[in-house]
Amino acid sequence: MSTHPSHQIAQRIILAEDDESMRGFLERALARAGYHVTSFANGQDAYEQLRKEPFSLLLTDIVMPLMDGIELAKRASELDPDLKIMFITGFAAVTLNSEAPKDARVLSKPFHLKDLVREVDRLLEA
């Protein structure tokens, strides 16, 4: 019998999104899907938390104050090379530069929350 991995031991997601309402939507959708989510309004605060405890996935906006998502992802992957990374962005034309981890995924806004959950499930099952 196969159980969905997110319904076994909750996978831990750290979310960095500067838009408060978007952060709330994402956090609630992922929590309903069985994930444990810790969220921050900027990359710097998220990075400080990553230094303190392990997470399964970094879900980050690209454009944020204090530390952008690409810099956050780069530093996070230095702390934990096994950390999965997914970028969310409202700038569909954004291409990840060479600083971004090569296996990171990108989800362009707007997206449906069920699409986000499906992509997160896929990434964490990989």
Image (cartoon, rainbow, N blue to C red):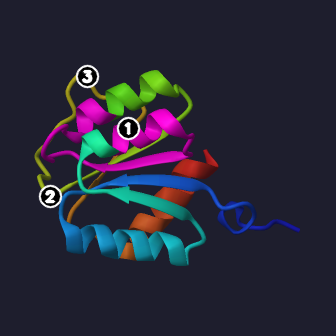
Q: Nearer the viewer, mark 2 or mark 1?
A: 1
Tag 3 or tag 2, which sits nearer the N-term? 2
- The residue located at (49%, 47%) in the rendering is 57
Asked whether 48 or 105 is in front, the reply is 48
Which quadrant, please, contains the C terminus?
top right
Task: Report the Cα–Cα distance between label 2 and label 1.
Answer: 25 Å
Location of mark 2 (residue): 90
Label 3 or label 1, whichever lies nearer to me, is 1
Q: Amino acid at mark 1?
A: Glu
- Marks 3 and 1 close (CB-CB < 8 Å): no
Q: In the image shown, does 81 or 105 lie closer to the viewer?
A: 81
Q: The N terminus lies in which quarter of the figure?
A: bottom right
- Depth check, front residue: 71 or 41: 41
In which image quadrant can residue 24 be found? bottom left
Residue for point 43% across, 32% down: 103
Q: CA distance from mark 2 to mark 3?
A: 19 Å
The location of residue 5, given as percent across then percent down, is: 70, 60
User: Label 3, on which residue?
Assistant: 99
Q: Position of residue 54 (x, y in %)?
A: 57, 40
Q: Is 69 rendered above or below residue 113? A: above
As drawn, is 119 to the left or to the right of 2? left
Mark 1: secondary structure = helix
**Amino acid identity at mark 2:** Gly
Secondary structure of the residue carrying numbered label 3:
loop
| Element type where label 2 sits in the image | loop
What residue range appears in magenta?
46-72
Sequence-wise, the earlier of marks 3 and 1 is 1
